[in-house]
Image: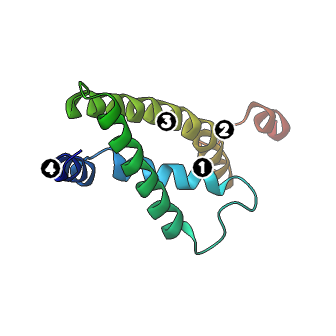
Amino acid sequence: MDTNFLLAILVWFIGNGSIPILVPLIVDILKRIPGLVKDGTSGTWASAINLVGLVGFSILFFALPGTSFASVDAVLVNILRIVTIVLGFAAELFVGPAVHDAGKEAKLPLLGYSITGARRNN
């Protein structure tokens, strides 16, 4: 293992567009585990995850010399696509009822309509 190998991985890791999106997502998921990520420690957790990622990718590229940066980038992009779909679906589960409740509260005719509420008013 030479210095150019490590420098190439470091430059790829810093310039990768997927990692800055995945690391905060991982930290936010870890925050959901009670008592794991305490207030004010997100930066430390993000730094640790970045370090683990850098070491992990270094081991991957060292252990599998045929692995290209482009193939790993493609895998990370696919992971982000899956995360986008899952988060989009999760957002629909929470945003829809919130919009309905806000429309009902504001007495908007379309957004806050309720069949039960309409029967009570008749």
Q: Who is closer to the viewer here, 29 or 54?
A: 54
Q: Nearer the viewer, residue 11 or 64?
A: 64
Alpha carbons under labels 2 and 4: distance apart: 64 Å
Q: Position of residue 104 (x, y in %)?
A: 67, 48
Q: Mark 2 vs mark 4: give the one in front.
A: 4
What is the x, y in percent for residue 56?
41, 43
Q: Nearer the viewer, mark 3 or mark 4?
A: 4
Report which residue position mark 1 lands on. Answer: 29
Say if mark 2 contacts mark 3, CB within 8 Å: no
Tag 4: amino acid: Asn
Query: Residue shown at 51%/38% (left/top)?
Result: 87
Q: Amino acid at mark 2?
A: Tyr
Q: Between tags 2 and 3, which lies in front?
A: 3
Q: Earlier in the sequence, mark 2 or mark 3?
A: 3
Amino acid type indicated by mark 1:
Ile
Element carrying mark 3: helix
* Comparing labels 4 and 1, the label whose residue is closer to the camera: 4
Proximity of marks 1 and 3: CB atoms separated by less than 8 Å: no
Task: Name the secondary structure under disc 4.
Answer: helix
Number of other residues with Cα within 10 Å of mark 4, as a class: few under 14, some 14 to 19, many 20 or more:
few
* Sequence-first disc among 4 and 1: 4
Q: What's the distance in space between the residues labelled 4 and 1, CA to CA?
A: 35 Å
- Residue contact at pointers 2 and 1, CB within 8 angstroms: no
In front of the other: 27 or 7: 7
Q: Which residue is mark 2?
A: 113
